[in-house]
Amino acid sequence: MNKVRFYYDIVCPYSYLESHVVEAGEDAGRAQVEWLPFELRPAPRPLLEPRGDHLRVDWTQHVYRRALSLGVEIHLPRYQPRSTLPLAACLWAEEAGGLRAFRHALYEAFFCEGLDIATDAEIARAAERAGLDPTEAVAATYSPRLGARLAEIRVTAEAAGVRGVPSLLTGDGESHWGMGGLERLLEGRPLVPRAV
């Protein structure tokens, strides 16, 4: 079985789409996956304009096509929030044993329902939908320990060559940035690291 680290951001459409493929590999017993949150645009980096040309063009040319090929519902979000708080909550959900369901609830709220998942209300709602304690979820988003863990994950990932999401890192140190990393690994094809 292939052991991999999968780096994702909860506001990245490619992470959302690739998570379906990675979960399928995990469910089939073909990969043992460590899910690691990696904030694509941490402060003070600027956020994308929700209705800017970059997003509209990228979604029209790439995101919708990939979603259609995977049979995944996805819509251009109305918001482009910082993902620091939801990602801290993902670390908490993993500790609570409900990361997958919590991640699904956040992705669905953001990419299908068009909600701002960086708010306390939406983090609580996602926790409730995942069968987790909403009050604990919100408290966890502001945990200095989890904030430090997010930063530590980022430093370790960047030292290993991860520069964006979705990214896959193997136990041998090979990395793949973008879509199709697990598929390539399982097929024995070379991975495609991101150019620095």
Image: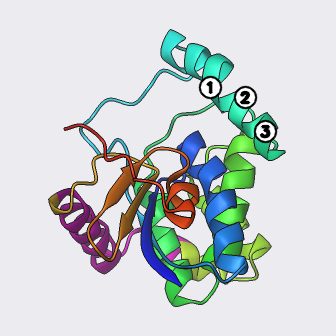
SS state under label 2: helix
When the figure is inspected, residue 144 is found, relative to residue 50, above or below; the finding is below
Give the residue number, with chain letter if any, for mark 3: 69
* Residue 25 at x, y percent in the picture: 66, 71
The kind of residue on which mark 2 rests is: Arg
Between residue 72 and residue 12, name the one nearer to us: 72
Q: Are marks 2 and 3 in contact (CB under 8 Å)?
A: yes
Q: CA distance from mark 2 to mark 3?
A: 6 Å
**Which residue in the rendered view is the most extreme toward the left?**
159
Chain part drawn in magenta: 138-158
**Does residue 22 appear anywhere in the picture?**
yes
The kind of residue on which mark 3 rests is: Ser
SS state under label 1: helix
Q: What is the number of the mark on residue 62?
A: 1
- Residue at image location 25% in from the left, 62% down from the top: 157
In the picture provided, is 80 more to the left or to the right than 62?
left
- Residue at image location 32% in from the left, 29% down from the top: 46
Between residue 85 and residue 154, name the one nearer to us: 154
Q: CA distance from mark 2 to mark 1?
A: 5 Å
* Residue 138 at x, y percent in the picture: 54, 71
Q: Main secondary structure of the magenta part?
A: helix
Q: Are marks 2 and 1 in contact (CB under 8 Å)?
A: yes
Give the residue number, with chain letter if any, for mark 2: 65
In the picture provided, is 189 more to the left or to the right than 145?
right
**Does residue 76 appear anywhere in the picture?**
no
